Image (tube, rainbow, N blue to C red):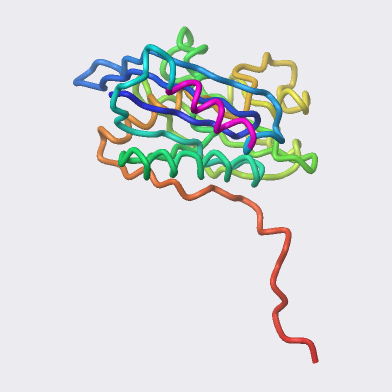
Amino acid sequence: MLIVSIDSSLGSRLLVCEAAGPAADAPVRLEVLADAEQADSRRHAESLGPMLAGALADPAVADRALDAVVVATGPAPFTGLRAGLVTARVIGRVRAVPVHGVPSPDALARAALDELAAEGAGAVVLVATDARRKEVYAARYRARGADDVERLGDLVVGPPERAADLGGAGAVAGSGAVLHPRIAGGRPVLAAGSGDARAQVRIALARLAAGEALGTEPLYLRHADVQMPAGGRR
C-alpha cells in the first residue's frame, strides 16, 4: 500500500511510505519513500501544501496510485491540528482514498516503546506532550503487539504535576516532558516530539487489521476559548 502520513501536532511532518501487513504474526513492514518536515509550530497552513506537492513529485512516488492517508487527530493546539486534518481530508477527496485517524500520543508511545523493546513486553511509558498554557496532555501506555499500543487509563490535560502523579511508568516520552523536567524525574526522555508520522501508520494498519474504525474527528480535551452567550441581552 502507498500511504501518505501527516502529523501536525507540533511542527509539520509528512511522509509517503510503502507499507504491508500485518499478516499472521508478522509486524507491519514500512519503507519511507519521501519525507518532508518543518519545525515551526505556527506555519502549518503555509507549509503543508508545498511539502505535499514535493513529496508526491518525488521520483519514487510520482505516477503511483495512492491507497490511503493516515493523519494525527491530536490532542494538539487547534490551528496546527486542523491544518493537518484538512490537508488529509482534501487528499482523500481528490484521490478518492480512505483517511484514517490516530491519536498523536498513541503514535509517540509506540515510538518510545520501540526504544524500550529490550525491556520486554511489560514496559510502560508515560507520554506527556506540550498543551501550552504551562500544561501537558498525558497518559500511560504499554505495547499491544508489535505495532499497536494500549492506553492505561484516561488521556488527561493539566499541570505537569498531574502528569508526574501518573505513576507506574518506567520511562517517559514527549515534548511536555522536555519542557517540564519534573515529569521525567531524572529519567531520560524518549521520543521527544508531540507525535510520530511513521509510527501512526503502523498503528493504523494494526487497528484496521483488527477491524477497528479510525475516525478523523479532532481530539480536544479543553472547551473552546470562545463560548456563545447562554441568553440574549435584555
Task: Relative to 128, say whether 20 is above or below.
Answer: above
Q: Residue furthest left?
A: 24
Q: Quadrant of residue 42?
A: top right
> Where the N terminus falls, by quadrant?
top left
Residue 9 vs residue 151, the one in the foreground = 9
Residue 188 vs residue 198, the one in the foreground = 198
127 horizontally vs 151: left or right: right
Residue 219: x and y, percent? Answer: 54, 47
Residue 53: x and y, percent? Answer: 49, 27
Count every numbered label the image shows and give the total.
0
Q: Residue at x 46, y 11 (%)?
A: 117
Task: Relative to 32, say whether 109 is above or below.
Answer: below
Check if residue 215 falls in the magenta segment: no
Q: Residue at x 50, y 21 (%)?
A: 54
Check if residue 48 falls in the magenta segment: yes
Q: Residue at x 63, y 35 (%)?
A: 44
> Where the C terminus falls, by quadrant?
bottom right
Task: Relative to 224, say whether 91 is above or below.
Answer: above
Residue 183: x and y, percent? Answer: 72, 28
9 horizontally vs 110: left or right: right
Q: Residue furthest top?
A: 118
Q: Residue at x 47, y 50 (%)?
A: 217
Residue 69: x and y, percent? Answer: 39, 34
User: What range is drawn magenta here?
Assistant: 46-56
Dominant secondary-structure state across the stretch colored magenta: helix
